[in-house]
Image (spheres, rainbow, N blue to C red):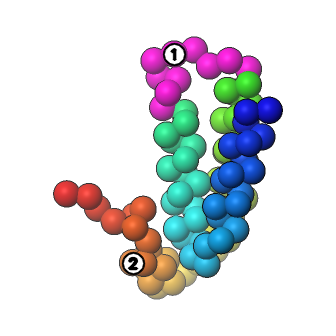
Amino acid sequence: MKYLSLLFFSLLLFSCSKNIVCDCAKAGENLNKYANRFLTEIPSQANKDSIALLKQERESVCAEVKTLSTEKLEELSADCDVLQVRQ
């Protein structure tokens, strides 16, 4: 049940955005943040299910990005805070 709430929240977050590159980057970041917890602890089956759902979500959100031209990727990436280098 907990992972369903996570998936619903993520889908709601991405449905509000108009920048598919940002959505893709955020989906990857969400997956990484969640999965990084399990570098130091053993995930339960529910945690594994949540990771699988986040991976599916990332693949779904990023599918269109894979077809973009380099120019379009650069244009959309410039407007995405998630992809900005933090110093």
Q: CA distance from mark 1 to mark 2?
A: 36 Å
In-image side of 8 versus 24 (left or right): right
Residue at x 54%, y 70% (from the top left corner): 21
Residue 6, numbered circle: none
Q: Residue furthest left?
A: 87
Residue at x 48%, y 79% (from the top left corner): 76
Q: Amino acid at mark 2?
A: Ala
**Mark 2 surroundings within 10 Å by alpha-carbon count, few (fewer than 14), some (14 through 19), many (20 or more):** some
Secondary structure type for disc 2: helix
Across and down, in percent, residue 47 comes to: 67, 26
Is 83 part of what is drawn in magenta?
no
Across and down, in percent, residue 19 comes to: 57, 76
6 and 85: which one is in front? 6
Secondary structure type for disc 1: loop
Mark 1 — residue?
41
**Chain part drawn in magenta:** 36-45
Task: Looking at the image, tell me whether mark 1 or mark 2 is earlier in sequence order.
Answer: 1
Q: Can you say which quadrant of the picture contains the N terminus?
A: top right
Residue at x 54%, y 81% (from the top left corner): 69
In-image side of 86 versus 27 (left or right): left
Q: Amino acid at mark 1?
A: Glu
Mark 2 — residue?
78
